[in-house]
Amino acid sequence: MRPLDGMTVVSFEHAIAAPFCTRQLADLGARVIKIERPKVGDFARGYDERVNGLSSHFAWTNRSKESLTLDVKHPEASTILERLLDKADVLVQNLAPGAAERLGLSYETQSKVRPRLIVCDISGYGNDGPYRDKKAYDLLIQAEAGFLSITGTAEQPSKAGCSIADISAGMYAYTNILAALLQRNKTNQGAHIDISMLESMTEWMTYPLYYAYEGAAPPPRAGAAHATIFPYGPFKAGDGKTVILGLQNEREWEVFCRVVLEKPEMASDPHFASNSLRTKNRESLTTLIHHVFAALTAEAIVERLDRAQIANARMNDMHDLWQHPQLKARGRWTEVSSPVGTIPALYPPGMPGAFEPRMDGVPALGQHSQAILGELGYAPSEIDALAEAGAI
């Protein structure tokens, strides 16, 4: 038994935030029915063709789901949706602002006839406020939430290399849905969950917010280095490779000077005697560190860092990550089916040993339409007619 076996999730989803949320629910055993536009589908299907012709984003966020194509403007669509929602425990949507209300999918409407239904709305800015109707994409939310202002180099801001605003919203939607399911067990009542990408990212930005409390200077953009802890970031070795290292306290600073730099006297240098001073004087300290590292290979530096028990890492690229020995040793990879054949897939992080996560295939567009409509009571001839009319 998986925790969400027997639960049904109906999702009007596209892009990343909602699909990422519902994939987590599917991992735990929920049946996720993904509603897509006929012929077109979730537009994330067309982002790229990097996975043997399949979109990399779509392969990542849509395994273990069933795809039902449905033209919501067709006269029969409302009947299909009513029958679907009668079987649903959770409704998730990240449609354009106002679209869910027009389709009768708001919590206010649904709770009157399905009081146990949990409705989760995911949007850029939330269901009210002056930004309610403003379009929101991942990069735009990174900008609005101040993330760009603290990320990048001193000269140039940079966005995160993955969709962190979407991911944060998707994960808060996921955890709130789990909490609502637990609460429903106590009250027998559903819930309305209003997830804002801006609020999700602002939560993740709370450390720099507090750092800039009451008008104080915010953390400066520091590239791959830490803005307020030093030394913490990338350093070049003599063989041209890059080593990432991080110090957290004064004890580690003393060991770093003695074991790694082999300059124990630096530990008491008044220019570097605290983290604040090392951060203030990072340019001169960087020069001193690079002077030592220039005579060493990356492998030799890592050996010294490990001996000193100083945290360190390689700067891997995606090809390195595919082959990461730790992921391989822990058996974190499996394979799932897809419209383009079998593809590798990463097991969900942190799954309890009491059950196996659901790792079913990535669906083709409309792959499950006939089967789902059959479950809802439609005869084969009726399904064929709906397909002929372009309703599915």
Image (tube, helix red, strand yellow):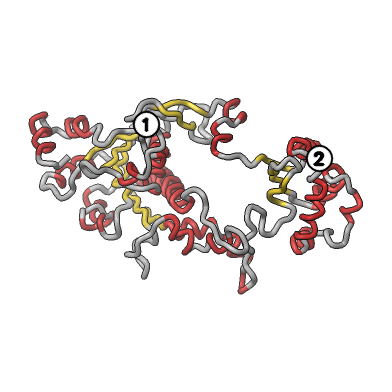
What SS does tag 2 mark? loop
Question: Residue 239 falls in which quadrant of the image?
Answer: top right
Say left or right for 313 vs 124.
Answer: right
Q: To which residue does mark 1 refer?
A: 5
Q: Amino acid at mark 2?
A: Ala
Q: Earlier in the sequence, mark 2 or mark 1?
A: 1
Classify the position of the N terminus by image quarter: top left
Q: Position of residue 4 (x, y in %)?
A: 39, 34
Q: Residues within 10 Å of mark 2 (few under 14, many from 20)?
A: some
Please determine whether, in this image, residue 319 is positioned above or below residue 43.
above
Q: To which residue does mark 2 refer?
A: 308
Q: Position of residue 343 (x, y in %)?
A: 42, 28
> Image point 27% across, 40% down: which residue?
88
> Image point 79% across, 45% down: which residue?
293
Q: Residue furthest right?
A: 265
Q: Amino acid at mark 1?
A: Asp
The residue closer to the viewer here, 334 or 148, is 148
Say left or right for 253 vs 126.
Answer: right
**Measured Cα–Cα span from mark 2 to mark 1:** 48 Å
Classify the position of the C terminus by image quarter: top left
Q: Residues within 10 Å of mark 1 (few under 14, many from 20)?
A: some
Say left or right for 195 vs 325.
Answer: left
